[in-house]
Image: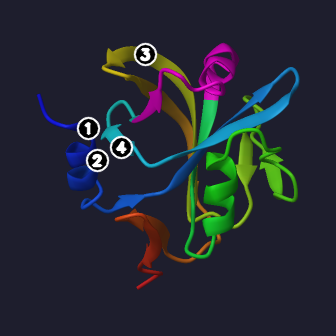
């Protein structure tokens, strides 16, 4: 069996995009920072992300049945950090609009967003693999994508 610290170090060598998964609940908006997002299928349009089984936010998103993937733009590190912290009001000072139909929060200034409904949830060790059916998507106003690599934030691209 591999040592978890070695595995984390190796996995950290792979740069990932940074997203914030959000949803609307009866008690207000919820969300968390997620680096394990990917497109899954073009036909039908499906995406997936992984979430820790210990997440206190995930049960609220699952109950909502829908979510928004906010692809953070270069310069949105503070949002990424805020939505990764426990015990803070994650939406304080964060501008957003609500998606028609799902009410999922779409964060302002992102590189892109995708609204989805929960299609399936599968087990994956200490995480869950969530598959969502995309019902709306758009490129945002933010330039470039926020990346995370070896414990630090960076960015990639802008419009060509």
Camera-nearest label, 4 or 1: 1
Mark 2 residue crowding within 10 angstroms, few (<14) / some (14–19) / many (20+)? few
Whole-number angstrom distance, CA of label 3 to CA of label 4: 14 Å
Whole-number angstrom distance, CA of label 2 to CA of label 3: 27 Å
User: At 36% from the left edge and 43% from the top edge, which residue is drawn?
Assistant: 39
Tell me whether circle 1 and circle 3 mark residues in contact (CB < 8 Å). no
In the image, residue 140 above or below residue 4:
below
Camera-nearest label, 2 or 3: 2
Whole-number angstrom distance, CA of label 1 to CA of label 3: 28 Å
The location of residue 5, given as percent across then percent down, is 27, 45
In the image, residue 92 above or below residue 102:
below
Whole-number angstrom distance, CA of label 1 to CA of label 2: 6 Å
Residue bearing mark 1: 4
Tell me whether circle 1 and circle 2 mark residues in contact (CB < 8 Å). yes
Where, quadrant-wise, is the N terminus in this rendering?
Answer: top left
Whole-number angstrom distance, CA of label 4 to CA of label 2: 23 Å
Lower sequence index among marks 4 and 1: 1
The location of residue 156, given as percent across then percent down, is 41, 76
User: At 42% from the left edge and 16% from the top edge, which residue is drawn?
Assistant: 121
The location of residue 8, given as percent across then percent down, is 28, 47
Let me know if residue 56 is in the magenta part: yes
Residue bearing mark 3: 120
Residue bearing mark 4: 39
Tell me whether circle 2 and circle 3 mark residues in contact (CB < 8 Å). no
């Amino acid at each position: 069996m591999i040592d978890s610290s070695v595995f984390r170090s190796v996995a950290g060598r792979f740069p990932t995009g940074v997203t914030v998964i959000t949803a609307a609940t009866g008690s207000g908006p919820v969300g968390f920072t997620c680096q394990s997002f990917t497109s899954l299928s073009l036909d039908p349009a499906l995406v997936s992300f992984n979430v820790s089984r210990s997440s206190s936010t995930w049960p609220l998103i699952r109950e909502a049945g829908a979510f928004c993937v906010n692809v953070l733009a270069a310069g949105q590190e503070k949002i990424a950090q805020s939505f990764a912290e426990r015990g803070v009001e994650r939406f304080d000072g964060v501008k957003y609009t609500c998606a028609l139909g799902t009410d999922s929060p779409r964060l302002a200034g992102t590189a892109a967003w995708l609204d989805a409904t929960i299609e399936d949830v599968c087990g994956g060790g200490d995480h869950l693999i969530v598959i969502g059916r995309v019902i709306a998507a758009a490129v945002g106003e933010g330039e470039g994508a926020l990346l995370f690599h070896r414990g630090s934030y960076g960015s990639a691209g802008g419009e060509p």
